[in-house]
Amino acid sequence: KGKEQILILSQKYCIGAIHFFSGLLTRWQTSAPAIRTPSSSNSFSQNIPSSLWKLGRLNHVAIAVPDLEKAQSLYKDVLGAQVSETVALPEHGVYIVFVELGNTKLELLHPLGEKSPIASFLQKNKTGGMHHICIEVDDIKAAMTELKKKKIRILSEEPKIGAHGKPVIFLHPKDCHGVLVELEQA
């Protein structure tokens, strides 16, 4: 008989909780503004033109640093991230270090040589800062062709080999809402 009473009380409690939460949900739905998500928005998916190339994942966020050793120490010793060794890329005028994150990487950039683009960046931004983002593409040549047609300036005539040994291009920040965008062949 005790088990039956517990079962009846449990059922009443569950029914009461269901009524409470369904009422709360109804009030929330009627008082909250409608939120459109990409999956529920017809115009979002229908207005994207088909293309011969596709954007992929965010490969890295690049940060220019005035002191590479201090930056490495911050990410490795203070934050506990896995940090690569320093690599010199003279053709790009930079030293680089990659910081591995769960879903992407940070690329720490430090000037190499007097004509380094990072040196001029650091002259304007003494403490360093975000330099560019890198997004993978499945066909860099097709991306270049289409972006040129859309009047997006590319900072080189041909792709260069980037830090990962893959072709890369940079898009002019004035054409990308103030962000220097690197596209890398996936």
Image (cartoon, rainbow, N blue to C red):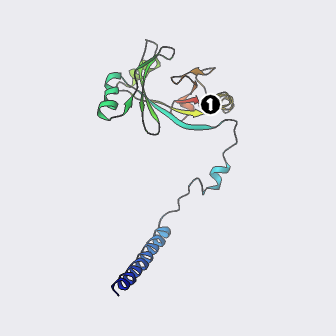
Q: 114 or 71: nearer the eye?
A: 71
Residue name at image x 43 percent, y 19 percent: 87
x, y (%) of residue 182? 54, 29
**Residue 129 placement: quadrant:** top left
Q: Amino acid at mark 1?
A: Ile
Q: Where 114 falls versus 133 (above or below)?
A: above
Q: Quadrant of residue 121?
A: top left
Relative image position of residue 83 (x, y in whole percent): 38, 28
- In the picture, which quadrant includes the C terminus? top right
Secondary element under disc 1, as helix, strand or loop, is loop
Residue plotted at (48% across, 72% down): 26
Answer whether residue 67 is visible to the viewer in this image.
Answer: no
Instruction: Count numbered badges in the picture.
Output: 1
- Please rate how many residues cluster around mark 1, counting C-alpha atoms within 10 Å: few if below 14, some from 14 to 19, many from 20: some
Residue at the disc numbered 1: 152
Instruction: Tell me the quarter of the image containing the N terminus.
Output: bottom left
Q: As drawn, is 174 to the left or to the right of 109? A: right
Q: Nearer the viewer, residue 174 or 160?
A: 160
Q: Is residue 145 above or below residue 92?
A: below
